[in-house]
Amino acid sequence: MSISRRKCLKWIGAAGIGSVAGKSAFAAGNKHFEGYPGSFGVLHDITLCVGCRSCEAACANVNELPLPDKPFTDLSVLQEKRRTTEKAYTVVNQYEVPGKKAPVFRKNQCNHCLEPACASACFVKAFKKTETGAVTYDPTVCVGCRYCMIACPFDIPTYEYDEPLTPRIMKCTMCYPRVIKGELPGCVEACPKEAMTFGKREDLIRLAHDRFRKYPGRYVDHIYGETEMGGTSWLYISSAPFSEVGMREDLGVTPAPELTSGALSAVPMVVGLWPVLLTGIYAISKRKEIVFQQELEEAVRTASDKANSKLADALAKVKKETKNAVEKAAQPRTKEDI
Amino acid sequence: MSDKPAMEVKTWLTPFNIVSGSIIIVGIVLTILRFTMGLGAVTNLSNDNPWGLWIGFDLLVGVALAAGGYVTSAAVYLFGMKKYHSAVRPAVLTGFLGYSLVVFALNYDVGRPWRLPYPFIIQQGTSSLLFEVAACVALYLTVLFLEFVPAPLEWLGIKKVRELAVKLTLALTILGVVLSTLHQSSLGALFLIAPSKLHPLWYSPYLPVYFFVSSIIAGLSMVIFESTLSHHFFHDKMDETHLNENQGVTLGFGKAASLVLAGYFIIKVMGIAGGDNWSLLVTPYGIWFLVELIGFVALPSFLYAIGVRNRDVKLIKWTAAWTVIGIVINRLNVCLIAFNWQLPSSQRYFPHWMEIATSVFIVTVGIVIFRFIVTKMPIFYEHPEYKDVH
Ligand code: SF4
Ligand code: SF4
Ligand code: SF4
């Protein structure tokens, strides 16, 4: 443990976090967010991790999680690649890295993104990026749709599938309840190798660069989490390429909310434009119909006019003819009469 | 006296009743299991695969295939294609039933279904595409209900209210199109947040556009497909107008579907070009993608065109069924098959038989209700008292 409890308390006082934490938390939105100034994080130095699972045990302890079937002292579980579960917020995995004699260990837990995908995805705002840096979850509003699990690029949130009526999302809290009390996260405190350092994120980045300088050639020149998905509060440095220790290097630097902001901004467009366009189309088709109707009537009228005049002609003709005929008929008679 | 009960038994035990009855009994048992043992007991969902068949099929496919309602009412009331008028009621009914079932199915999938209103009344997660989906589906279900309500009102003989509902037709149609555009596209946009999990051939910034355009295709094809089935089973319920207009509907909608499919094909190809994903086409996923693109987009577009040109109603009907299968494949690809493609096969998802049975149960409930309604209410025929008042 490289940071004393007293120092931790002092920071918290300085950041005013004890009183304001969670009051007006970052609402996942479309604005770019670079993290709360002075918010905390953890730097995990993978080169120092020995895979003892003390952090796993401490995490289960402080979060009152059920004990696993195999005790935490059983290191055989390191053989398989484990992920976080609803009973384990953090897991340590072992990796054989080509070109390295000894295996490499890496701890996995929520990375507490600066702009969390989970928070941006949740439709009841159950997640909150607090000013401590921790991304916390509120089970009293969660509907259990599991979209946060779809969204998280690090595959962190887990779900209580065996709870029929009250399932919760389960994930690392960065020990938010402890941190606001001035305590260190359970795992950080328990690590016998000081593989993790808790502190302000800016300081941690500086610390990482110090180590790069101090031990040339030991580290890959990259702080994982500094820019990944827009940056995370949990940071990693490693001697092995990150992809060799199960960390994706293809995530890019775009924070999650930016991925969906385009689609969201189209909403007012559709709402504003569609009705106007559709009414227009309706008017045109209606107008067409009216014009069609009129033309039809017109056609009928001209047709009937024509027919009428023809009829009149015909009638006149008939009349004339009858008249003639009558006259003709009358003539002989008159003649006869005469 | 003594043989009367026997006769009743005989009339009730039709093949339809036996099959649907058994499915519903199984469904009820599964419902009890789900709500007493949890999702873990009846599904293969896991922390790696939080969404399964109930989202991929019940929600995504369900909403896409229920698009016939907005497509048909827009064609008739907004685009002035009055000659398809008799297609509106069945389409609106299937739309309304479809959406009701989608919402019903969601109650199985989400953890605490009674909290489904929370996003509206407790805290609005407006940054979430799922919020948009939820809001639009809820509103659209109301719209569909109002569009559908004249039928039961005619059946019950309540004239005043019916007149009011009919007067709203135009406004409801416009609202329906707006809401459908929004949620059909948002269902695709749900996956925009996970570029690292969805295969690049299916992931595209155009996902919302793809989902919207393909929903039009789904709507048109479903109207043709359903009318084929309805003709088979409910021919005696149809009045002359319906029967006479039917061929026109099939030809007209077939032509429209051919065109929209062609447009969809073009924007899908633009998507590959935009992501410069050509090289991926020769991978196994790429071949599967081509099967979808060539077999279920290009081919039906072509077949529809031929069918319309030759006035070959039979070909159009088969093409409609084929296209519907294509839509199902597309939605399952995005949500399940091409999702989590990088995970080792041991961590991939395949639905549990109980998930499949539950989905079959929900579809069966829909068919039973549909059958009840079309045999009782004026759906395929115009109510004698309300003729010519549309
Ligand atoms: S790692 Fe995942 S769960 Fe943790 S804050 Fe980021 S998106 Fe959320
Ligand atoms: S499962 Fe809960 S926390 Fe996760 S997105 Fe859904 S409502 Fe939000
Ligand atoms: S910060 Fe707390 S919750 Fe997170 S892994 Fe460490 S002990 Fe567990």
Image (tube, rainbow, N blue to C red):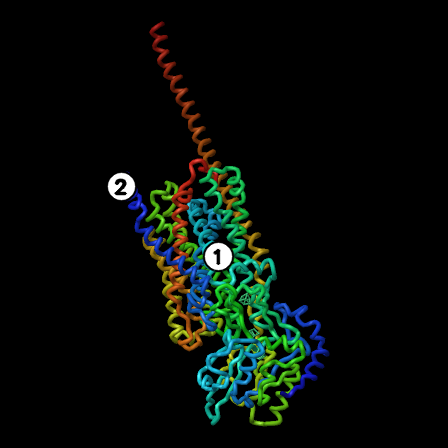
Which residue, given by chain and number where applicable, does mark 2 sit on?
Answer: B3
State the image coordinates of residue A303 (x, y, percent, origin top left): 44, 34
State the image coordinates of residue A195 (x, y, percent, origin top left): 58, 88
SS of the residue at dot 2? loop
| Farthest front residue in view | B2
- Could one spot residue B43 in this view of the protein? yes
SS of the residue at dot 1? helix
Please give the name of the residue rendered at 28% of the width and 38% of the height, measured from the top-left corner: B1
Residue A105 vs residue A193, the one in the foreground: A193
Mark 2 packing: few (<14 Cα in 10 Å), some, or many (20+)?
few
Please give the name of the residue rendered at 51% of the width and 70% of the height, measured from the top-left corner: A149
Beta carbon at label 1 within 8 Å of ligand 2: no
Which residue, given by chain and number where applicable, does mark 1 sit on?
Answer: B103
Residue at mark 1 to residue at mark 2: CA–CA distance: 44 Å
Is A162 placed above or below B324 here?
below
Mark 1 packing: few (<14 Cα in 10 Å), some, or many (20+)?
many
State the image coordinates of residue A56 (x, y, percent, origin top left): 53, 82
Q: Where the N terminus of chain A falls, by quadrant?
A: bottom right
Question: In this rendering, would B386 be left or right of A259?
Answer: left
The reply to the same-chain question for discs 1 and 2 is yes
Q: Where the C terminus of chain A falls, by quadrant?
A: top left
Quadrant of ligand 1: it is bottom right
